[in-house]
């Protein structure tokens, strides 16, 4: 695990890129992360799912047992042999918030998001000042072999895209077949 001095050196060398970077958020061995916005999914009175994104510059009241997806303010990109581990900030534990965290691989450049659940029976106010999570950094020694591969996110996207294409193709074939049957019914009805 890297110390704050090592993290600062890695930032200066470009091995760790944090945008925007705020030195005040760097602790002894981790960096504190702030939420930027949340994605809310709720059902309306007709039972339809409504999704909306809300900026956390204003406070949001998280209802008891409500789940939202939190996107953090920072974009973090790590060079090869660096990785990060996310963990919930202790203030979230005190507020009764459960955070789903994971890890950050090198060269990941997409938005970083966490699941946030209010486990209490009371409302909880959240805003952009909340320390939602922290990240620890580690560098794998040059002498230790690494195999980069099994990039599930790319495979996942490729598989989902292929399946959606197959679905549309089947849907088109189905509609074509239904029209053929309707035409035959019409022909036989005329006789």
Image (tube, rainbow, N blue to C red):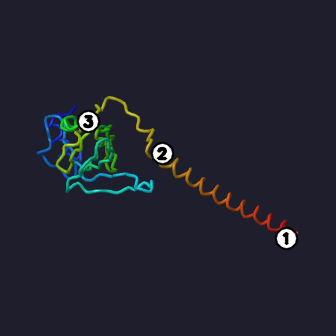
Please name whichever residue, 22 or 91, is drawn nearer the observer in this view of the structure: 91
Badge 1 marks a residue whose secondary structure is helix
The x and y percentages for residue 56 are: 23, 54
Q: Quadrant of the N terminus?
A: top left
Residue 82 makes an appearance in the image: no
Front-most of residues 105 and 46: 46
Image position, residue 105 (x, y; %): 33, 40
The local crowd at label 1, few if under 14, some if 14 to 19, many if 20 or more residues have their Cα within 10 Å, is: few
> Going by the picture, which residue comes out furthest to the bottom?
190
- The mark that comes first in sequence, 3 or 2, is 3
Quick check: can you spot residue 186? yes
Which mark, residue 25?
none
Looking at the rendered structure, the secondary structure element under dot 3 is strand
Q: Which marked residue is nearer to the observer: mark 1 or mark 2?
A: 1
Query: Is 71 placed above or below 27 here?
Result: below
The picture places residue 101, in percent across and down from the top left corner, at 31, 38
Q: Residue furthest right?
A: 191
Residue marked by disc 1: 190
Helix, strand or loop status at disc 2: helix
Give the residue number, with chain letter if any, for mark 2: 156
Callout 3 environment at 10 Å: few (<14), some (14 to 19), or many (20+)?
Answer: some
At 72% across and 64% down in the image, what residue appears? Answer: 179
Q: Quadrant of residue 65?
A: top left
> Of marks 3 and 1, which one's residue comes earlier in the chain?
3
Q: Which residue is mark 3?
A: 87
């Amino acid at each position: 695990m890297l110390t704050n001095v090592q993290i600062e050196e890695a930032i200066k060398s470009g091995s760790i890129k944090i945008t925007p970077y705020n030195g005040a958020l760097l602790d002894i061995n981790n960096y504190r992360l702030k939420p930027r916005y949340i994605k809310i999914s709720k059902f309306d009175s007709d039972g339809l799912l409504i999704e909306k994104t809300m900026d956390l510059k204003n406070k949001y009241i998280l209802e008891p047992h409500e789940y939202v997806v939190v996107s953090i303010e920072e974009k973090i990109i790590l060079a090869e042999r660096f990785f990060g581990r996310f963990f919930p900030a202790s203030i979230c534990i005190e507020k009764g918030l459960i955070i789903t965290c994971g890890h950050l691989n090198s060269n990941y450049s997409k938005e970083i998001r966490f699941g946030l659940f209010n486990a209490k029976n009371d409302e909880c106010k959240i805003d952009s000042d909340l320390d939602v999570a922290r990240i620890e950094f580690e560098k794998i020694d040059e002498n230790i072999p690494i195999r980069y591969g099994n990039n599930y996110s790319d495979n996942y996207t490729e598989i989902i895209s292929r399946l959606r294409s197959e679905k549309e193709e089947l849907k088109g074939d189905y509609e074509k077949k239904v029209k053929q049957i309707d035409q035959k019914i019409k022909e036989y009805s005329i006789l």
